[in-house]
Image (cartoon, grey):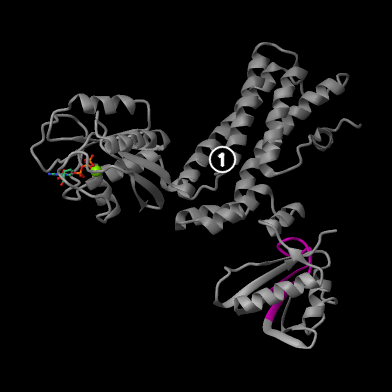
Amino acid sequence: MFETIVALATPPLKSALAIIRLSGDDCFDVVSPMFNKDLREITEKTILYGAIVDGDEKIDQVVLLAYKGPRSFTGEDSVEIICHGSMLIVNQIISLAIKHGARLATHGEFSSRAFFHNKIDLIQAESINDVINATTQESKKLSLLSLDGEVTKMVTPIRSKIADILSLIEVNIDFPEYEDIEIANKEKVLEYVDLINDKINRLISNGQKAKIIKDGIRVAIVGKPNVGKSSLLNALIGEDKAIVTDIAGTTRDIVEGDINLKGVVLHLLDTAGIRDSKDFVESIGIDKAKESIKKAELVIVVLDASKTLDAEDDAILRITEDLNRIIVYNKSDKKIIQEVNGLFISALKKDISPLVDEIYRTLGLDDQAFKTPALNNARQIGLLERAKESLLIAKEDALNDLPIDLVAVSIRDAYEAILEILGEVNQIDISKEIFARFCVGK
Ligand SMILES: Nc1nc2c(ncn2[C@@H]2O[C@H](COP(=O)(O)OP(=O)(O)OP(=O)(O)O)[C@@H](O)[C@H]2O)c(=O)[nH]1
Ligand SMILES: [Mg+2]
């Protein structure tokens, strides 16, 4: 029995209209006594115009949408009350619903009910939040594809391929006497594992790109003092946010700015110039700069094109060596001393397009990345990685000629990880798969 839950679906602010949502097995019983029409005989989606009442007192004139389960978002009988957007009215209606047997919904409870009633899978449930939180058109489009079940369609072939090899192994173990079944040997396992991991790798790579489209990327601008980091931040965001002076050591604290680069949000961090400093405040800033290098997913190292590199530049190049970084030569409007084949910009003249193009190129986002539905959160990508690791162990076990039932242990782990992505019970019921695939009961 699913209790009826109630919640305000629109923001708790004064507005033209507000929507209060209810869902539960006895939803129509809860709402009927507080509405001037009876919902209990409703058999299909219905829109009603009427009054919310508390006994003789009229609370508000509303439009009420009644959904007969299972043809509703949650799969249960549900009601949406569109009332006037006064918080006084909203609170009265919610209190009334509670008086008549509903309880306040917890976070995400409507979606979790939809998941429980198999209206959506876990990937779709997660994408509801993504649609709501999307900050760019591009990420919203990707999330909608996921909500439509497009991502699920990419995971299910992996799930069934793993089930194929698992069931093949089990049939071989359980029914060795059958001669007309395929042999599950080392070669077969290797063939399947490679095939499945190919698919998983593609999903991981697409997922990482989609995550960038969804969450944006943290970009730290670093370099020694006075090379033009703050000028570069200002040029990128198109406003004079960071203080620029010709005094080395101007920036002390991190200055942040966001830009939308062709649909990808870059969280830019302008940092203090890194050098050996005796100044107490400056050295705190320098520590923060080093910290932000570690946290950034991309580092822009700024060098001065009009000067020869010195030990301070070298030190910064060394600490960023193994990171995802772009090196730029700023102040290209001056006489260029640096004779290298690099990226030359002038933050002062706002001539930074070579860098912008390079950032975009580094992200590896082609047109396709914006159209390809993908698993894109840490949970999903983490589980994909787990499935991949387990399959690699299975591959190694097979190569080491371990008995096939031991090889199957890691393949089962991979299967569980994939089921977990979809939010399916962590229970392996391979037997169903076996009988669906093989004709052993002859
Ligand atoms: N000619 C020229 N001058 C520039 C350019 N970019 C920055 N400058 C100048 O260089 C000086 C330092 O610029 P900032 O942007 O403050 O440098 P910074 O790297 O943030 O310096 P700190 O905060 O002290 O680490 C200022 O006088 C800027 O006007 C450029 O592209 N060309
Ligand atoms: Mg600065």
Q: Residue at x 83, y 37 (%)?
A: 432
Left/right of residue 22 with respect to residue 307 in the rendered view:
right
Q: Name the kind of residue labelled 1 in the image.
A: Ala
- Residue 181 in picture, x, y percent from top left: 81, 25
Give the secondary structure at mark 1.
helix
Left/right of residue 388 with respect to residue 303 in the rendered view:
right
Residue that sits furthest to the top in the current view: 400
The 10 Å Cα crowd at callout 1, few under 14, some 14 to 19, many 20 or more, is few
Quarter of the image where the N terminus is located: bottom right
Quarter of the image where the C terminus is located: top right
Extent of the magenta region:
63-81
Q: Residue at x 22, y 47 (%)?
A: 231
- Residue 351 in picture, x, y percent from top left: 19, 48
Residue in the foreground of this view, choosing between 1 and 366: 1
Task: Report whether residue 179 is seen.
Answer: no
- Residue 440 in picture, x, y percent from top left: 87, 30
The residue where tag 1 is placed is 378
Q: Residue at x 25, y 45 (%)?
A: 230
Residue 304: quarter of image: top left
- Inspect the magenta stretch and tell me whether residue 331 lies in it: no
Relative height, residue 372 to residue 54 (above, below): above
- Inspect the magenta stretch and tell me whether residue 66 lies in it: yes
| Location of ligand 2 given as a quarter of the image | top left
**Number of residue marks:** 1
Residue that sits furthest to the front in the current view: 280
Task: Report whether residue 436 is seen.
Answer: yes
Q: Residue at x 64, y 52 (%)?
A: 124
Residue in the foreground of this view, choosing between 149 and 385: 385
- Residue 191 in picture, x, y percent from top left: 64, 23
Left/right of residue 342 with respect to residue 335 in the rendered view:
right
